[in-house]
Amino acid sequence: MRIKETICRVSLLMLFALVGASCTSTDVNERPNVVLIIADDMNWNDCGAYGHPTIRTAHLDKLAATGMRFDHAYLTASSCSPSRSSIITGRYPHNTGAEQLHWALPKSSLTFVEQLKDSGYYTAAAGKWHLGNNLKDRFDLVVEANVAGFQLPTGDGKTPPKMVADKKPSGCEDWVPVLKQRPKDKPFFMWFAALDPHRAYEQGALNPPHKTSDIIVPPHMPDHPDVREDLRLYYDEIGRLDLYVGRVKAELEKQGVADNTVIIFMSDNGRPFPRDKTSLYDGGIKTPFIVNWPAGIKPDQVSKSLVSSIDIGPTILELAGLKAGSTFEGKSFAGILQDPTEEIHEYVFGEDHWHDYEDHARSIGNQNFKLIRNSFNDLPTTPSADAGRSLTWQAMLKLNKAGKLNKIQQACFTAPRPKYELYDLKKDPHEIKNLANDPAYQGVFNKLKVELAKWSERTGDYVPSKRTPDEFDRVTGEPDHSVRKRPRPSKMDMYGTNGKY
């Protein structure tokens, strides 16, 4: 072990000793509490802490100013339930048994939550669940919010889709009540998951609302009035989420436990707009990642180190004085909380599986470059179905038909797409110029291609021999009821005879 790593670990252990973090402590209550807050479909830099000048996120900004902001935190999936399943198990999506949207984690899944619970932690979840019913017994309490927005028929396949009328606006309403009712004689872990800023959007999420002039339209979307309005509503839901983050922090302070409570804020995947959510671009798999722990992290820290969402479980377990088992594929970043320059990964990896539409892709990246491998490159990068019913998508359909979209804005309509995409993230942060065929970058391309293949082999990754059909129309976003139920494929369907990379 390197000297610096040893020093970091010793410092961390000394800190645990000071706060009684060891499992053998006579007072188990002194181990750090943990609150994991998960936004739903929030882009990594859509808050003030990451430099956005107009989105109102005062509470998130304060969390970062009094804690640590990670500038290179990545998710393993750009899809809601696969991402959450990966977080809670510490495994890559293709190894969870829940890699496709809406698939529940198997009952046999091992998570970090039951390890905390078995060691004396009180464990609770509130807000959006989206993990299936098999894991609810890992928590002492689960308060599940109604899923927001567009709902599919579940019976005869003929009933038209409708909006849920009794949904809770943000999914965050139960966070503080759950904190208040926790037992006071145990350390606690809270899984707080929002519905914000997931679609469908509605007026009145934030008062006062953001203005049209606040909007910054990314280059892969057209600057159109409908796009600006869509983004404005998205901004409002981020602002509403921020208010609930502030209420959680205030309640922790009121209870006198804020200093020894680790708050981790992140998103499950990127913005629900074209070329973001369900893609392997940074708009899909890069996440805001803020860790606040007054007893353990100095204020105003920034880490440029690579971290992955599969590292969350091992980290929380280490902070609780526990050890992650062999099923976890991530690494603890607890040392980074003491030394922001410590590195635990050379590369991070992302996956794209079925999400409303058939697709399969993988990515490898670091702070400088990203390589994307598209297995089903005969298909366009169609956005998620909720984004496909949005103001933005409808505007893009009209503009595309009129020939008024530029090349990057046309990407969601273009098929086939490249088998490989390589981007220089330093020079091209919006991932616009594909360098896969550029002679000047062949060294980087070949290196990342080899490392991605090694990872695929090491983790048992595969390309399905049988594709899962689309559930929605790729243009209108309307459902095809005939494929609503997707049975898990057989091993032959999954691996086939040529399924391995």
Image (tube, rainbow, N blue to C red):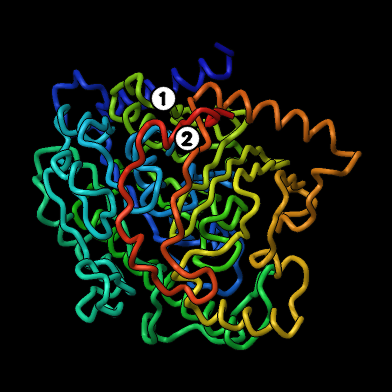
The numbered dot on residue 12 is 1
Where does the image place residue 129, in percent across and percent down from the top left?
Answer: 26, 54
Residue 160 placement: quadrant: bottom left
Q: Which residue is mark 2?
A: 337
Direction from residue 247 to residue 76 in the image, left or right: right
Query: Please, is residue 122 above or below residue 476 in the view?
Result: above
Residue 480: % across, % down: 39, 68
Residue sitting at 39 percent across and 70 percent down? 479
For marks 1 and 2 on the same chain, the one whose residue lies earlier in the sequence: 1
Q: What's the residue at 47%, 54% (across, down)?
A: 269
The span from disc 1 to disc 2 (Cα, nearest Å) is 9 Å
Camera-side residue: 251 or 243?
243
Q: Which is more toward the observer, 111 or 12?
A: 111
Question: Element at badge 1?
Answer: helix
Q: Is residue 73 left or right of residue 494?
A: right
Circle 1: residue type: Leu
Q: Secondary structure at mark 2?
A: helix
Quadrant of the image for the N terminus?
A: top right
Quadrant in which the C terminus appears: top right
Q: Are marks 1 and 2 in contact (CB under 8 Å)?
A: yes
Image location (x, y in percent) of residue 237: 41, 73
Residue shown at the point (21%, 22%) measured from the top left? 23
Q: Which residue is nearer to you in this view: 461 or 203?
A: 461
